[in-house]
């Protein structure tokens, strides 16, 4: 039993399922820690329509990295006191919390299982799926998606977990950096797949339970069946996403992370199946080839996500993706409006919570949210909590015992207004043997009087229950306009059951008036594998927005462009089909643009030969240049990813490849290009120079930009070499700075000098008796460790000291003052500004007073320092103790 387990107990007489148990339990009372959490509402201005209360404090849920809620209300919290940069195992667990009498107070708690770095949780009946880091002999060996069982329902896993996917992260960088860019949240869609948010560590040879292996360079979304089969990439090209939100119609949304000045900010994006989103090699200079995000939101750190679809919630907060942002301590709502095959969006601030990490809702509409609350990059046993949020008029509605429910009762639940109830009713139906479950699902799917979201649940339930036998009826549904998109998606969803799926409904749907239906059909054609579909795919129109950025410019990589999506997924399906011959034959026709776009990705000798032959027959210089450009793109390809390198937090974004290597047809391409270059006039040679620079081909004769040096083994930072170089703090990501600070201790005497030289003394005092300025630093070492002090300097807005939030005062004569209040009486207040100057203002002269959600301390004050200097400053401050 772990140390954490020893601290847990249960107020109930039984651990198991207290929420539904008929056995007696002893309701708990609110303790001071929970009351303290409750009191945050006033300062954080929680929405008046909601009742938000503390559910668990740091005594039970320190450093909560993720959470999930069973439909019956049991809350599973992933406690991670290793944190994102820590590397010492044995400091994590899944803690199970139960509100026995549904009064909002947690009455029962157990340690469900001991795991390190839990990053994703999903409960399903007596199973609990968990994504976490695996350690052996003290070293991280990868991340696994596993399942625990609790057959006896005592709130504790029956034994060791069983693997679903193994090695779904990069062990080398888990060991050197920690879990900060690794694989993260998991969530199940109504299609029955578990969707996994993959950070930009990527993975090499992840292995499912069929023995299938998958490699992924960079971030995106992967999915797998709950039994650990059929693992596949869903979308690619994201930076360090932490979770996904999935709506009832299988629209998937993600909120990414900023790369701290490298040009990729928080992105809110709609994840289209087979879509490429471009990070890091395409999103600047090859933007015509990507699906752009819906919006660039500036700096921050996207974390947990949920699509709220529960009837207990007010309309203004319902049927929306809710996206957490750790860096902004804010839960956002995105108002999404259908636009072609995708959406437009409007972001709204919803709920403030200190370094929010995750959120989930149960079948009664209880929303639970976890707050990291300043636990730092390496976890903290004294920080972190969980809150419960319900609408003010909320009433508890019990969730039935699914195992005792009849198929008729499950069918009724499948028609619920609640997404949670529909999903869990579906999963229970799928456990039932015989044809009755499929018949019940079909009745829901085919009932035209039911709401669309209910019919969609019925369609995907029927497809999963019927498997190959469901094909004929799903084909019939594909002829019905309202549900055509979903019938097509269900027909092509499972590769093991595609043999008897006819291609004709997909071919005809490519030209459907609905862009959403078009995309479902086009993606399906790529999955069905019929090469004869290539001609239909090539007829998908490419919009005028398919235009490469001008030399030296960036394209619009976060501007919504729904019109590009059908052509984008058509290109992906052509590549999946390896439709080389069809694309070659289309060169020079009205379908030439899409054909050449797809050929950029076909590193096939036949494609090279066909392009060279097409050049000889090309009738215009414009077409010849397009063919030359395609061949130049094919000259190199991305090096096979073996997990030994990673592009780091500040990658080279030039593109189109990160680690380019030549391949078997590179010599033929170079010879052909050289021949055409030698025959071109002097004025035409600039074209080849531009291609050489854009594609980093490294053909010296062409001139142009010099190719960068490529090192497959990512070089290690030599701290000894750069520790005294000025300005390193401003040039480095916060994660790398924190890692460096764990190795460099600095000297406190130098730190004391820097405290004065950097101007810290203007706003902070260290000796008692000095004039009160900003937060007192004379005892900071008793409150924070070195890592926490470093984080508070680098990210001052992440944890604002109580009483030192920025206040803006406007007086009746329209003068404005900004600072923090150092003294206040009934008649006056004293405000100290950023320079340390004190302003005495009469209360009667105040016209308006606002408390801003920012720190007086600006970011970047340490940017000019070297690693050694910064280490010395935080060491000096850490020694200031009572």
Image: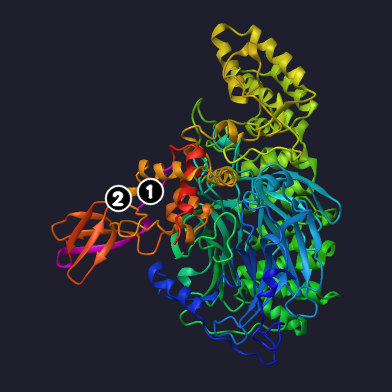
Give the labeled residue for mark 1: 858
Looking at the image, residue 494 lies above or below residue 662: below
Examine the structure image and report whether residue 861 is included in the region drawn in magenta.
yes
Give the labeled residue for mark 2: 834
For the view shown, which residue lies furthest in the left direction?
Answer: 813
Looking at the image, residue 313 lies above or below residue 792: below
Examine the structure image and report whether residue 766 is included in the region drawn in magenta.
no
The reply to whether dot 2 and dot 1 touch (C-beta < 8 Å) is yes
**Could one spot residue 297 in this view of the protein?**
no
Percent from the top left, x then y, of residue 340?
A: 55, 51
Residue for point 86% across, 75% down? 434
Looking at the image, residue 560 lies above or below residue 726: below
The image quadrant that residue 829 belongs to is bottom left
Name the N-terminal-most of marks 2 and 1: 2
777 or 204: nearer the eye?
Answer: 777
472 or 6: nearer the eye?
Answer: 6
Quadrant location, the C terminus: bottom left
- For the record, the magenta segment spans 843-862
């Amino acid at each position: 039993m772990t140390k954490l387990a020893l601290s847990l107990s249960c107020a109930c007489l039984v651990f198991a399922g207290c929420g539904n148990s008929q056995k007696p339990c002893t309701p708990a009372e609110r303790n001071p820690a929970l009351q303290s959490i409750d009191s945050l509402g006033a300062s954080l201005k929680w929405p008046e329509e909601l009742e938000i209360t503390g559910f668990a404090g740091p005594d039970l849920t320190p450093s909560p990295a993720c959470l999930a809620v069973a439909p019956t209300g049991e809350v599973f919290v992933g406690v991670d006191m290793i944190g994102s940069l820590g590397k010492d195992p044995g400091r994590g667990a899944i803690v199970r919390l139960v509100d026995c009498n549904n009064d909002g107070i947690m009455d029962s708690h157990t340690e469900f299982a001991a795991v390190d770095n839990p990053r994703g949780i999903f409960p399903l009946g007596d199973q609990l799926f968990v994504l976490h880091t695996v350690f052996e002999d003290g070293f991280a060996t990868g991340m696994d998606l596993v399942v625990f069982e609790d057959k006896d329902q005592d709130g504790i896993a029956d034994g060791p977990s069983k693997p679903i996917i193994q090695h779904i992260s990069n062990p080398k960088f888990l060991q050197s950096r920690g879990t900060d860019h690794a694989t993260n949240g998991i969530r199940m869609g109504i299609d029955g797949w578990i969707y996994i948010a993959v950070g930009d560590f990527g993975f090499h040879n992840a292995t499912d339970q069929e023995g299938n292996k998958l490699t992924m360079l960079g971030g995106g979304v992967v999915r797998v069946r709950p039994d650990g089969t059929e693992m596949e990439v869903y979308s690619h090209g994201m930076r360090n996403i932490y979770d996904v939100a999935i709506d009832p119609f299988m629209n998937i949304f993600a909120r990414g992370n900023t790369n701290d000045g490298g040009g990729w900010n928080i992105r809110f994006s709609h994840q289209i199946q087979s879509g490429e989103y471009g990070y890091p090699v395409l999103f600047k200079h090859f933007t015509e080839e990507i699906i752009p995000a819906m919006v660039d939101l500036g700096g921050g750190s996207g974390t947990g996500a949920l699509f709220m679809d529960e009837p207990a919630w007010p309309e203004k907060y319902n049927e929306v993706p809710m996206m957490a942002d750790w860096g902004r301590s804010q839960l956002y709502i995105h108002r999404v409006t259908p636009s072609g095959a995708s959406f437009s969006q409007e972001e709204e601030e919803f709920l403030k919570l200190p370094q929010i990490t995750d959120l989930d809702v149960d079948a009664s509409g209880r929303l639970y949210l976890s707050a990291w609350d300043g636990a730092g990059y390496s976890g903290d046993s004294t920080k972190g909590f969980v809150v419960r949020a319900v609408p003010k008029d909320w009433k508890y509605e019990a969730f039935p015992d699914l195992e005792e429910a009849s198929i008729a009762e499950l069918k009724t639940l499948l028609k619920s207004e609640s997404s949670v109830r529909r999903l869990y009713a579906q999963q229970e139906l799928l456990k039932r043997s015989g044809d009755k479950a499929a018949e019940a699902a079909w009745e829901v799917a085919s009932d035209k009087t039911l709401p669309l979201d209910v019919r969609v649940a019925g369609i995907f339930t029927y497809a999963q229950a019927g498997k190959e036998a469901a094909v004929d009826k799903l084909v019939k549904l594909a002829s019905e306009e309202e549900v055509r998109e979903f019938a097509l998606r269900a027909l092509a969803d499972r590769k093991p059951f595609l043999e008897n799926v006819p291609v004709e409904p997909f071919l005809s749907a490519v030209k459907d008036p609905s862009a959403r239906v078009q995309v479902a059909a086009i993606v399906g054609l790529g999955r069905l594998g019929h090469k004869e579909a290539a001609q239909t795919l090539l007829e998908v129109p490419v919009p005028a927005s398919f235009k490469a950025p001008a030399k030296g410019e960036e394209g619009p990589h976060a501007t919504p462009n729904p019109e590009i999506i059908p052509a984008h997924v058509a290109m992906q399906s052509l590549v999946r089909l390896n439709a080389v011959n069809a694309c070659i034959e289309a060169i020079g026709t009205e379908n030439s643009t899409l054909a050449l776009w797809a050929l950029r990705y076909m590193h096939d000798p036949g494609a090279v030969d066909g392009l060279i032959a097409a050049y000889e027959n090309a009738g215009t210089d414009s077409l010849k240049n397009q063919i030359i450009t395609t061949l130049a793109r094919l000259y190199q390809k991305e090096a096979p990813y073996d997990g030994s390198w990673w592009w780091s937090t500040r990658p080279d974004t030039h593109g189109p490849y990160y680690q380019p290597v030549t391949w078997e047809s590179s010599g033929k391409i170079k010879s052909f290009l050289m021949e055409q270059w030698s025959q071109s006039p002097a004025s035409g040679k600039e074209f080849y120079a531009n291609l050489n620079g854009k594609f980093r081909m490294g053909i010296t004769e062409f001139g142009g930009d010099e190719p960068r040096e490529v090192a497959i083994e990512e070089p290690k930072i030599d701290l000894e070499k750069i520790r005294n170089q000025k300005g390193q703090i401003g040039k480095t990501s916060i994660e790398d700075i924190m890692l460096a600070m764990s190795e460099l201790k600095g000297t406190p005497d130098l730190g004391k000098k820097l405290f004065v030289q950097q101007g810290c003394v203007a706003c902070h005092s260290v000796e008692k008796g000095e004039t009160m300025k900003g937060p007192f630093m004379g005892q900071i070492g008793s409150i924070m460790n070195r890592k926490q002090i470093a984080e508070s300097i680098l990210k001052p807005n992440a944890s604002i000291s109580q009483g030192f939030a920025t206040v803006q005062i406007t007086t009746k004569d329209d003068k404005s003052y900004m600072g923090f209040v150092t003294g206040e009486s009934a008649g006056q207040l004293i405000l100290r500004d950023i320079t340390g100057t004190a302003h005495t203002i009469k209360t009667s002269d105040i016209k308006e007073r606002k408390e801003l959600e920012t720190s007086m301390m600006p970011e970047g004050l340490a940017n000019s320092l070297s690693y050694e200097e910064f280490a010395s400053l935080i060491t000096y401050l850490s020694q200031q103790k009572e």
